[in-house]
Image (cartoon, grey):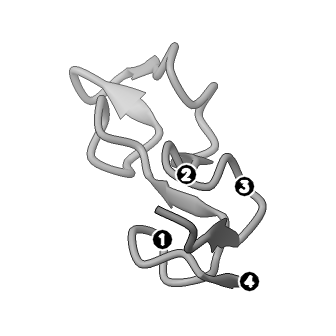
Amino acid sequence: MAKQCHQCKGLGKMKCPRCDATGKLNGKDKCYHCQGERYVLCTLCGGKTKIDDKK
Protein backbone atom coordinates (compact mmCIF):
# COMPACT_ATOMS: atom_id res chain seq x y z
CA MET A 1 0.00 0.00 0.00
CA ALA A 2 1.31 3.45 -0.90
CA LYS A 3 1.54 6.27 1.60
CA GLN A 4 2.26 9.98 1.35
CA CYS A 5 5.91 10.76 0.69
CA HIS A 6 7.50 12.03 3.88
CA GLN A 7 10.27 13.91 2.08
CA CYS A 8 8.07 16.24 0.01
CA LYS A 9 5.00 15.91 2.26
CA GLY A 10 2.90 14.76 -0.68
CA LEU A 11 3.66 17.72 -2.93
CA GLY A 12 5.82 15.82 -5.42
CA LYS A 13 8.37 18.62 -5.49
CA MET A 14 11.00 20.13 -3.24
CA LYS A 15 12.82 23.44 -3.00
CA CYS A 16 15.80 23.42 -5.33
CA PRO A 17 18.89 22.60 -3.27
CA ARG A 18 21.26 24.34 -5.72
CA CYS A 19 19.70 27.82 -5.59
CA ASP A 20 17.83 27.50 -2.27
CA ALA A 21 14.54 28.07 -4.14
CA THR A 22 15.52 31.49 -5.47
CA GLY A 23 15.66 30.41 -9.12
CA LYS A 24 19.01 32.16 -9.51
CA LEU A 25 22.65 31.34 -8.90
CA ASN A 26 24.93 34.05 -7.58
CA GLY A 27 21.90 36.32 -7.46
CA LYS A 28 21.77 36.79 -11.24
CA ASP A 29 22.13 33.68 -13.42
CA LYS A 30 19.18 31.34 -13.90
CA CYS A 31 19.68 28.15 -11.90
CA TYR A 32 20.68 25.27 -14.18
CA HIS A 33 19.23 22.64 -11.83
CA CYS A 34 15.63 23.91 -11.64
CA GLN A 35 15.73 26.09 -14.78
CA GLY A 36 14.67 29.06 -12.67
CA GLU A 37 11.48 27.34 -11.49
CA ARG A 38 12.66 27.26 -7.83
CA TYR A 39 11.43 23.67 -7.31
CA VAL A 40 12.57 20.25 -8.51
CA LEU A 41 10.91 16.84 -8.49
CA CYS A 42 11.15 15.03 -5.18
CA THR A 43 14.12 12.67 -5.22
CA LEU A 44 12.29 10.07 -3.13
CA CYS A 45 8.92 9.75 -4.88
CA GLY A 46 9.95 11.19 -8.24
CA GLY A 47 7.00 13.58 -8.24
CA LYS A 48 4.39 10.89 -7.66
CA THR A 49 3.53 12.22 -4.15
CA LYS A 50 3.30 8.70 -2.71
CA ILE A 51 5.82 6.00 -1.88
CA ASP A 52 5.40 2.27 -1.52
CA ASP A 53 5.69 1.30 2.12
CA LYS A 54 6.86 -2.25 1.37
CA LYS A 55 10.19 -3.13 2.94
Residue denoted by label 4: 1
Q: Which mark is residue 47?
A: 3
Q: Position of residue 42 (x, y in %)?
A: 55, 51
Circle 1 — which element? loop
Q: Earlier in the sequence, mark 2 or mark 3?
A: 2
Within 10 Å of disc 1 (Cα), the crowding (few <14, some 14-19, many 20+) is many
Q: Nearer the viewer, residue 28 or 53?
A: 53
Q: Residue at x 63, y 43 (%)?
A: 37
Q: Earlier in the sequence, mark 3 or mark 4?
A: 4
Residue denoted by label 2: 42
Q: Position of residue 25 (x, y in %)?
A: 31, 22
Circle 2 — which element? loop
Q: Nearer the viewer, mark 4 or mark 2?
A: 4
Q: Nearer the viewer, mark 3 or mark 4?
A: 4
Q: Earlier in the sequence, mark 3 or mark 1?
A: 1
Q: Which mark is residue 23?
A: none
Q: Is 21 positioned to the left or the right of 31 in the image? A: left
Q: Earlier in the sequence, mark 1 or mark 4?
A: 4
The amino acid sitting under disc 4 is: Met
Q: Residue at x 64, y 76 (%)?
A: 11
Q: In the rendered image of this protein, does residue 1 appear above or below residue 38? A: below
Find out whether the residues at labels 1 and 2 contact each other: C-beta distance under 8 Å: yes
Tell me how far mark 1 sits from mark 2, CA to CA.
Answer: 6 Å
Circle 3 — which element? loop
Within 10 Å of disc 4 (Cα), the crowding (few <14, some 14-19, many 20+) is few
Residue denoted by label 1: 8
Tell me how far mark 3 sits from mark 1, CA to CA.
Answer: 9 Å
